[in-house]
Image: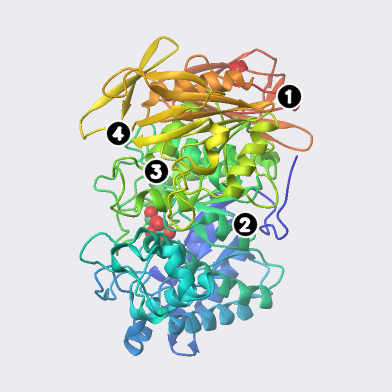
Amino acid sequence: MTTTPSRPIRLDALAYGGDYNPDQWPEEVWVEDARLMREAGVNLVSLPVFSWPRIEKTQGTYDFDWLDRVINLLWEHGIKVDLATATATPPAWLIREHPEILPHNVHGQRLEFGSRQAYCPSSPVFRSHALRLTEAMAVRYAEHPALALWHISNEYGDHVPRCWCPVSGAHFRRWLESRYGDIDGLNEAWGTSCWGQHYLSFDHIEPPRTSMGPINPSQLLDFERFGSDALLELFQSEIDVLRRVTPDIPVTTNFMSLFKELDYWDFAAVEDVVTDDAYPDPGDPLAHVPAALNYGLMRSLKSGQPWLLLEQAPSAVSWRDVNVPKAPGRMRLDSYQAIAHGSDGAMFFQWRQARFGPEKFHSAMLGHRGEKSRTFAETAALGAELKKIDAVRGSRVSARVALVVDWDSWWGSSANDSLPSQRLDWLEQARAWHGALFALGQTVDVVKAGGGFESPFARYDVVVVPNLYVVTQEQAEALTSFVEGGGHLVVGPFSGVVDPTEKIHPGGAPGPLRNLLGVEVDEWWPLADGDTGAITLAGSDHEIETWSEWIDVADSAEVVATYSTGVLDGRAAIVRNASGAGAAWYLSAALRENGLEAVLGQILDAASVDRRQHPNRLLEVVTRVGDDESFTFFLNHGADEILVQAPAAAVDLLCGADIPIGADIRLPGFGVAVLAHRTLDLTPTSL
Ligand code: GAL
């Protein structure tokens, strides 16, 4: 089963390459770059991401000659471009003419020029200049045969996800007015009768800057939504220009994996191809586990369509406190992991390692030692090897389990300081749940909370919801019909708490999920710092931390686990409620890894989803399903050899050997195997 987006990247191979900053180098180096890129199998480069001042030297005075020369040179070497609109960083001349473009932080202080992304997302002045440049770029390169993809801006929100300046304030007020219609609507939604917050006019509302005490949570949640929408509006305005001038060229902006500040469901909906920047920490031996969740999100943002890993580090980055390099083989393994998860290629930041600026210690495909650098040797080897797995292009990842990611719930449950506990971290929970599923051998897709016109859950056997703090009636109905239709649903603590205006659902949590889950929360019972507790599940004790709840259980529901410590000792901790052809589970506590593995393992069994009996976080097996054949990737994320068995008669694409069913495949430390075989019902236990 292969899919192509309506406007696919104009490339007929897996994408391989990286960011290229030719304006940091004299022209003779470009010639060497193009030669070495070709040698390394590079076929796509991203440029000129931060070159606005070099292209538009003063307002309306463009210098495209140098860029023409670079792009032509690349094209002569068979390399296409992921062409940046170059609007990621406004030039100093523009800032000095219009200092009002500069963003303000939450304390109302203006941030000074001197780094990148020096703009307020709501600034109409910035936008009009950015769109002028976008149009000039589009007109200039519309017909260039090297143009494969538009790269709009760069990592929206990386440095300035929110702005609290007066211009943003006015934009926020307009946004609120269109959301609520009139000020009475806003007063009702925001519950302004609490703490004397009543407003007479939208003009009286400001963005939530540093205040004297806790800020109205409804205002905070709306500001998060607004902040994401403000950047989305900017993104859309560039897309509009590009679609007008170059209607057939696909557009993208590079995401930042699971990034709290932007609701990527909305961003993905308006672009052609999802691209992501991922920087798993080589210093963390389990960094590939959250990476798998990020990649699950990326492929799911456009219903399973292939996406592209646009940036990763060939070795060390330069922005952590300690920047551990990637051991030999690790860069190859990380690239294959993204491809296994649906990326149609592997790209890097950056091609040539910088000699100056904040990224001079950041690794590159071509290190400071040039051709002699280790990263170049590994880059060239991988570039050659990827040609052997070209058949995977367009195939889709197979998954029976999905995890719900909902930005409203992420923001609402963590963006304010008036919560039962600050310790229940949305992302940590999502990662812990996913980590347990990973250990149990599952490939996990990501789904929206639902409630739209089409149920996102239908193609899965198991849907897990680590947290759904904000829930609507519609979403509850979509989850209910999934369960009634035979699905298995697992919902985590502190879910079903508020409606989209941040009001507690009548009767308390889990609000509209009450009948489905068969529980009512009487009180949240967070654990004091340093305290742990336990639950008993099937005769074994499992540790809990951070969070527990006093819940009452409906007659229809079955208690699966009870608390075995503290005030809640003997009370229900995990509950199962059968409904229609399926069942819903509610986990009222924050479990540690082994507890999550035990609970989720039981639920996978109930749903007849095969799983590993012995959880393993170092071996990953992912299958992509194509039209005529499937591709199973075996990834050894550990340093020690692992032996796996071929699930079917297959061809090992990397070494070309025919492999009989059941044959041993040796995966050395950080080793990879990619088997092509007929499509079968592969199960993690058979792998
Ligand atoms: C990304 C960014 C790149 C580069 C890279 C370094 O966040 O898009 O321009 O800075 O990080 O890791």
Q: Which residue is mark 2?
A: 273
Foreground of the two, 306 or 61: 306
Element at badge 2? loop
Name the amino acid, label 2.
Val
Q: CA distance from mark 2 to mark 3?
A: 27 Å
Mark with earlier residue (4, 3): 3
Mark on residue 426? 3
Is 246 on the left or on the right of 87, as rendered?
right
Quadrant of the drawing holding the C terminus: top right
Residue tagged by mark 4? 546
Kindly state the secondary structure of the residue where label 4 is placed: loop
Q: In terms of sequence position, does the residue under pointer 2 or pointer 3 come before the other? A: 2
Q: Which label sits in the foreground, 4 or 1?
A: 4
**Label 3 environment density (alpha carbons within 10 Å; few <14, some 14–19, many ≥20):** many
Q: Disc 3 on helix, strand or loop? A: helix
Indicate the position of residue 655 as horizontal and vertical percent values: 62, 27
Quadrant placement of the N terminus: top right
